[in-house]
Image (cartoon, rainbow, N blue to C red):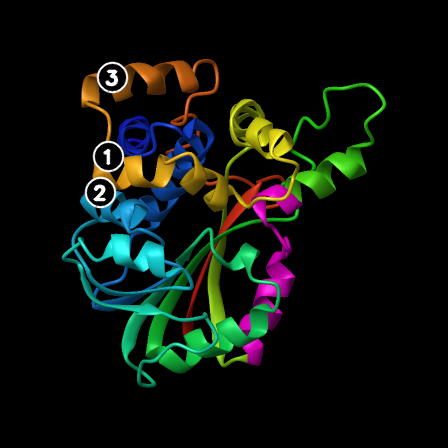
Amino acid sequence: MSNARLLRDFVAAYPAQPATAYWRAIEIGALVRLGLPEGLGLDLGCGDGILTDILLRHAGARQLVGVDLDPLETKAAGKFPFYSRLHVAPGNAIPEASETFDFVLANSVLEHIPGLDGTIAESARLLRQGGRFLFTVPGPAFHANLRGPLWPGVERSAYLETLDRRIVHYHYLSIADWEATAARHGMVLDGCLGYFDAVETKRWETLARMTGGLLYLRLGETRRPIEIQRRLGIRDMQNKGGLPNVVARLIASVISLRAPVDRNETHWLDTNGASCLLVHGRKV
């Protein structure tokens, strides 16, 4: 497995979202490197299942239960056989029995939930004793690693506020925050691993600025990314099939030029400077 191959897979799956493909290639590479637990897993915020399908191709087959707030997303995810059940439900009220799951996976989900404690409490309820959680999230260094506004006269603080509003990020918790949050709900951190460095973050920012960021501005800064994608038919295109591998490989090479997605694939970053964190632990 390599992040470069993951980027090809994500470009093929997300042909109109190069920034998302770039971020996900690095992020899923981090999850594969750590390894998924065995047993039955809860895919918290499963979306349309495309990301999880790519993850399992590289990390190995697992049986999962998916949950997402969006019924259109869970409907699309229904085509994947690794989901034994799918629920349309919030993260703090999942219709499953206590101590059902061997692990909970939340990939780039928790930063989008304003009131996080209820969702973490629900994850703890659903985990068996000793069951593991794996959360990929942006960390406190994310803002500092961005290039910032290009236009003179635009305050960096205003730029960051607009960016967070567009990508719907509510918080950037520190390791200490995650330790305290886990402890409140009978869980402990086994580790917190850093990925996504400043060069990679700026490359994502540039790609996002030219695609989703531009559309967000043109549409009056009122529509969420998924709403824009649906309006333009991008979600339907993704769920009907992707690009041929040869085309995806060419686009991937351009996207990652001078900022290769495999630059850190063999090691973890210092968490103080990493834009993203892979928080993992267990229920005690």
The image quarter containing residue 90 is bottom left
The alpha-carbon separation of the residues under discs 1 and 2 comes to: 7 Å
Q: Is residue 57 visible?
A: yes
- Gap in Å between the C-alphas at discs 3 and 2? 21 Å
Residue range highlighted in magenta: 165-184
> Does residue 280 lie above or below 220 as drawn?
below
Q: Which residue position is annotated with label 2? A: 58
Residue 151 x %, y %: 76, 19
Up-down relation of residue 265 to residue 183 (above or below) = above
198 is higher (above) or lower (below) than 98: above
Task: Please give the residue where the numbered disc 1 appears in the rendered image.
Answer: 1
Q: Report how far apart the C-alphas of labels 1 and 3 lie in the structure.
A: 20 Å
Q: Secondary structure at mark 3?
A: helix
Mark 1 and mark 3 lie on one chain; the one further toward the N terminus is 1
Residue that appears at 49% across and 66% down: 189
Q: Are marks 1 and 2 in contact (CB under 8 Å)?
A: yes
Locate residue 220: give its quadrant. Answer: top right
Label pair 3/2, CB-CB below 8 angstroms: no
Q: Most extreme residue toward the bottom, as rendered?
A: 98
Q: Which residue is mark 3?
A: 247
Residue at 53% over, 24% down: 203
- Position of residue 134 in the picture relative to residue 217 (left or right): left
- Amino acid type, label 3: Val
Three-letter amino acid code at the position of disc 2: His
- The mark nearer the N terminus, 1 or 2, is 1
Closer to the camera: disc 3 or disc 2? 3
Location of the C terminus by quadrant is bottom left
Position in image of residue 276 (x %, y %): 53, 45
Local SS, label 2:
helix
Q: Position of residue 223 (x, y in %)?
A: 57, 44
Q: Tell me, yes or no, whether the highlighted magenta stretch contains residue 171.
A: yes
